[in-house]
Amino acid sequence: MYMNMNFTLLIDTIFLGSTFSSVLIFLTCFLCLLSLLCTPEEKNSWTYMLCLASLLLVLILAFSSSNLMMFYIFFEASLIPTLMLIVGWGYQPERLQAGTYMMLYTVGASLPLLVILIWHCSSMASTEVYMLHLSSPLFKGVCGLVLFMAFLVKLPMYGVHLWLPKAHVEAPLAGSMILAGILLKLGGYGMMQMIYSFNLVLDNYTMLMICLSMWGGFLATMMCIQQVDVKSLVAYSSVGHMSIVSAGLLMDTSWGVMSAMVTMVAHGFSSSAMFCLAYFSYKKSHTRNIPYMKGMLQVYPILSMFWFMFCCINMACPPTLNLMGEMMIVGPLWKYSFLLVMCMGLMIFFSAAYNMYLYSCVNHGTFSSYVLPGYPLKTYSMIGLVSHMLPLVLIFKSSLFLSCNFLVFWNYSLQVVLSKTCRFSHM
């Protein structure tokens, strides 16, 4: 009996620590390194380096924490260096309003979560994730809505997303890269921790959140076509992609969780690269207004080539991780409702539409007088963009993610056997 329990604990540790959190820790370290590589003009600012280093440390501690209260502390602490990056190195005076929006939305939604965490951990006499999973009863109903709300704001879900476009528009390049590539994934990881710790089950409230998430993702992709600021367009595309993550986690199936993991990794690299392209194009054209950036292909063909490749990746062209993540979610959606599959199909269609619109408006058309011929892309820029692209071909090593599916099934089977053994021993 003791050996079985230790082996189950080992498998849980492998699943939670070595697959999900370790992938996100790798993503954190890699994107923080790329953010330093793509902004060499800030290398002499020690406060800038201190903000990035402290944000990296807090994120690693959050992703590697097995204590629920410590995870909440690091989850909230990540706001401080992010706010410092936006306010200290933002572009316009509106960065103060963007920082206020971000703080009000995230802190306001997470205060009810803190109350529930303190109540539940005190009643269960433990703050460890695994012990709470073993001792907690099944949770459902309004409690699940309160638990998920803080992380749905962080993802964000459409309706509580207004802070994200403002933060992206005002943030510097490193802030946008880390915000889109890592901080949004903190919301998905938190949802995974809550489902595991509280033993949340699928009910009508959860189905309502799944429907709102998918419908909100469709509305976000529609709003991308209406944007004139290139950074705002990429920010709204992040809202659409994160709706797939929230729906996959809320359905709590092996394919849904695996789709969420693949989509988070793929979106982390692709959205970070899109913000890099927006910044490099801004340095060439001195504007982020899409109609004024046209004609880049005539002056900077290499930059246009990267625009074409990352727009294809962002619209989930084969063979990329983005396509793999979107296809994995279709099966669980089909299981619950055909209308959700229709909504997913419309999201894919309009995702291709706004990416083609973005590429054609920025690179084709009559040469704009705002785009001045100058120096081509520098070496560090091309290294940064190529480094973003290499992990996105991991679909050829999809066994890395399929092994996670095997661990989920093996962990569930061991828990079923263990529970039956415990019942038999008490008879």
Image: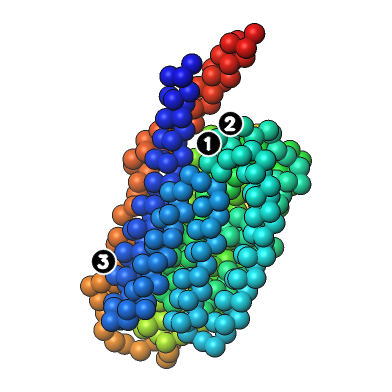
Q: Which color scheme did the rendering employ for the protein?
A: rainbow
Earlier-in-chain disc, 3 versus 2: 2
User: As displayed, is residue 116 above or below residue 302?
Assistant: above
The image shows a total of numbered marks equal to: 3
Q: Residue at x 51, y 52 (%)?
A: 70
Quarter residue 140 falls in: top right
Task: Check residue 383 in the rendering and tell me which mark sits there, or answer none.
Answer: 3
Can you see residue 6? yes
Q: Residue at x 45, y 76 (%)?
A: 85
Horizontal side of 149 relative to 52 (left or right) equals right
Using the image as rendered, state which of residue 319 and residue 84 is in the foreground. Answer: 84
Amino acid at pointer 2: Leu
Amino acid at pointer 3: Ile
In front: label 1 or label 3:
1
Q: At which x and y percent is residue 388?
A: 34, 60
User: As displayed, is residue 411 above or below residue 116?
Assistant: above
Can you see residue 406? no
- Distance, label 1 to label 2, CA atoms, is 6 Å
Amino acid at pointer 1: Tyr
